[in-house]
Structure formats: C-alpha cells, structure tokens
Image (cartoon, rainbow, N blue to C red):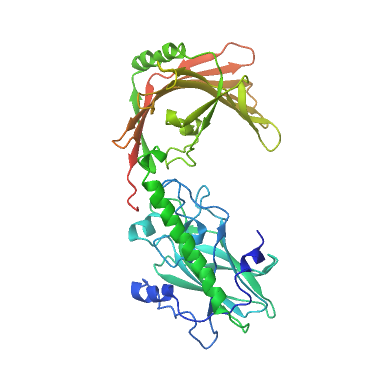
Amino acid sequence: MRVKRAFVLAVVLCGMGGSAAAERAGAGGATGTEPVPAAGQESAQHRWRPLRSAEATATSYLQNDWNLYQENYHPSYVLDENPATAWVEGAKGFGENEAITLPLSALRSARALRLRIWNGYQKSMHLWTKNAMPRRVRVTVLDADEEEVTASETELTRTRGPQEVVVDLPRGRGLAAVRITILSVYPGLRFDDTCISDILVDVDSDVPYNPVAENAKHEALLKWVAGRKDQARYFASRPPEFPFAFSRFVSKKASGDRQAFKQRFAAREAIGKTLGPTRYKPVTKQSVKVLPDGLSEENNYAEDFAQLFKADRVALLETKDDVVSRSDDEDGNPRAWTSSARVARGPDQKAIQALAFEAKEVITERSTWSYDRNLLLVYDGDGRLQTLYRSVNNFSESEGEDDYDTVTDTDEIWSFVYDAAGKVREIDVDSLARHHRMYGKKAAREREDRRAKHVVYLGLPDKSS
C-alpha cells in the first residue's frame, strides 16, 4: 500500500494540543531523563504540533498465539499511548534491519520532526529488562511517493519513559511518513525479541492544521485496539480452539532405555494393520497458526502434526492421489510433499482412532539433502491426539573431498499430557537413532545410539500476561 493512501482522513496537518502520553511521562517518572514538554509547547527553536497515525506497518512482528491467535505485538500498538503494549519484531535473532513505518498526514513543507520513543517493552520492569530494545536506529522521512526526504542515524538510550529524537528536514521539502530501522540493540536478559512500546510524532511546520481529521485518525486507532481486545476475550472464552495450555514450552533432555523403547515402538506395527485401504486428504477445520515458543524448533518438526491435535476437527476427503500436496522452492526444485493419509476408525466407523501419512522435503543446491517422515497418529476416546509414532530418514551428500553420504534413521514416540481443560501441558518425546555412512558403493557403516534419548517439553506460565 502506498503511503499516501493512508491520508484519506486528513488534508494538510500541523497539530496542536497536549497528549495523554506526555502527561503519562510526567506522572510516570522517566528514570534518568529530563521531563518531556507536552506536545504543542513552544520552544526557542521549534513549535511542535502532533501528527497522528491510524495504523502502522512493519517488516515483521512476533506471533506466538498468546491470547489464542490474537497478535499482541502488532506494530500499530506503538500508537496507542499505552506502554503495556508494544511492537515486537518477529525476525530471527535480535531483529537488526527490521523496520516500523508510521504513515503521517501529507505536508507540503516542514522544518523538523520530533519522535518521542518509549524504548523497550515498558509494561513492567520484568519485561523491560528481559527483552531487547533498539540501540542504534536509522530514522527515515518519506514523502507521499515513498521517496526518501532525509535520513539520519541516532543512538537511543536504555531508559524507561520517553526520549526525544529530532530530525531536521531539508528546506522546501514535505513529508508523508517516518520509518525507524533497527541497526543494533541492547540485548535482553532472557529473550532476543526487540521491542518498542510507543512512538509519538510531532512536527514543526507552517502548514495549516486540521484538528478534526487528526483526531479522527486517533479515534480509528483506538477503535482498532478495542476491537482486538474484544477478539481476545472471544477466543479466551473458547478454550478448545487452541490445543496448548501455555504459549511457551521449555525442553529438558535425559537418557532413555533402548530396549524399552523398541518394545513400545513395536506397537506401531499392530496399529498400522488396522488402517483401511482408502486414501484421504486430511483437511483441518481450524488450524494452529503458530506453535508456542519452544515447540517451533526446526529440529523437532512439530508442524507435521500441529493441525491434527483434535480428531473432530479433521475432515477427510477421499482421494486417489498418493501425493495430495506439494510445494516448490523459488528455483522450481521439489522442496516438500505430503502423502495422502489412511485411517483407522472406531466401531461406529465414524470416530478417528488412528491416522497415518508421510511428509518429505528435498533441497538441492550444491548437494542434496532430504528429510522424510512417516507418521502414525493415535487418538484417545475423547478424540485428542494421545501418541505419535514417527520414523525419520535424514539423508545428506558430502560436499568435501571425501566421497560419502550420511543417513540417519530415527524412530520417535511422542506422548501428550493434557490438563483438566483438555489442553496440552506437557509433551514427552522418546527416540532412538541409527547412523549410516556410505562410502561410494561400499557397504554402509551403521552405528546405533547406545542410549535412547528422552526429551520433555514442559509448559511454562507467561508471567507477563
């Protein structure tokens, strides 16, 4: 969306009047900073007027299914003058080069912009210290054609409360948006999510001011915030919609019993014999958009079955195709496919007791890597996923001078523990791996892990909620 499309609510603006954020700054006691003048207060250099935004956009934002699919960390939360909400970037690592853009009312000319920034997640001291916050940022002013008017870099302080950044504009140039790009961060004590709680924008300009349009944009923003709260309450009143009891899981690893694992995994063969011959395409009526933190690790592939926790939410469409879905990477090389499924039903031939299918990924660059998974899902009498049997084949070609291929076969048993509300509170994973190394056409050298592995994913309450 072009920046100038966001300006339908206002003609030319150059604001006046105080703001609730400025009052909050004075009452909240900004640590280590001087009090910030209220918006509209005149100074020897500038005459500031507030510019509002009805929405903000960002290159990414964190989504972790807290409040049941409602994104708490949307970029527009920097506009609500409430430090209990924040924009949290959603990239891997600390989010360097991630950016947030605030569309403003188009002005044909202006002397300067002032940004008042509440750096970090200022809902509480706990969140403020545990999460990261921007350190060095680039502030870019854009015109209505999204062309750069001016850009400058500045260093933000690790300070609670607001801090000011003033950007002087070239003579005779206007503006239509401001963008803040993260260049470096102050790391948090626990999380690598980088946060900004609030950003208020003021302008020094001779262009006449339209308070009606400016206030309309702010009202639109507050209406959006209220709507999201209503949605969060709606989903919170329906606990079966989200299968997990917590939005965050941590893993604890230990050794397992190899012989006991083999005996347990043998049950997979007996269950497999109950699967019917008909093939189906599983379609979930309600999908898990994002897994809780800790379950989205790349090496556990929980997304293979995340959509299938409740059997009553799975619709089975009969198909004759062995492969029912496929995706290709940007170069056109096969990257992933999912096989059609076979099913075992209860005595009434309606309830799903077990579901089996395969998933495969193939990536070819200088060498070939493939990751094949054969899954069997077993459901309890309440239609909840009880046990998952998964066989994994991981193949990779060597890239060096040694001519060998590596194959790892791993058998896994996932067991799910539910709370009284029927949500997953703990996941136990047992596994046993066998490693092969193929030297040309010679026989493989096989080594089975001496000990089985046992991993427990334990749900943790979110103290920030």
Could you tell me if residue 393 is visible in this image? no
Q: Residue furthest bottom?
A: 44
Image quadrant of residue 328?
Answer: top right
User: Is residue 360 shown above or below 41?
Assistant: above
| Left or right: residue 439 compared with residue 255 | right
Question: Residue 201 placed where, x, y %?
Answer: 53, 72
Judging depth in this view, the residue of 300 and 175 nearest the camera is 175
Quarter of the figure with the N terminus:
bottom right
| Left or right: residue 213 compared with residue 269 | right
Q: Residue furthest left?
A: 420
Judging depth in this view, the residue of 391 and 225 nearest the camera is 225
Residue at screen point 55% across, 20% down: 407
Could you tell me if residue 461 is visible in this image? yes
Question: Residue 95 placed where, x, y %?
Answer: 52, 53
Q: Residue furthest front?
A: 348
User: Is residue 411 shown above or below 247?
Assistant: above
Image quadrant of residue 204?
Answer: bottom right
Residue at screen point 62% across, 84% down: 206
Residue at screen point 66% across, 79% down: 109
Judging depth in this view, the residue of 121 and 434 nearest the camera is 121
- How many numbered circles are shown? 0
Question: Residue 92 placed where, x, y %?
Answer: 52, 47
Question: Residue 154 placed where, x, y %?
Answer: 54, 68
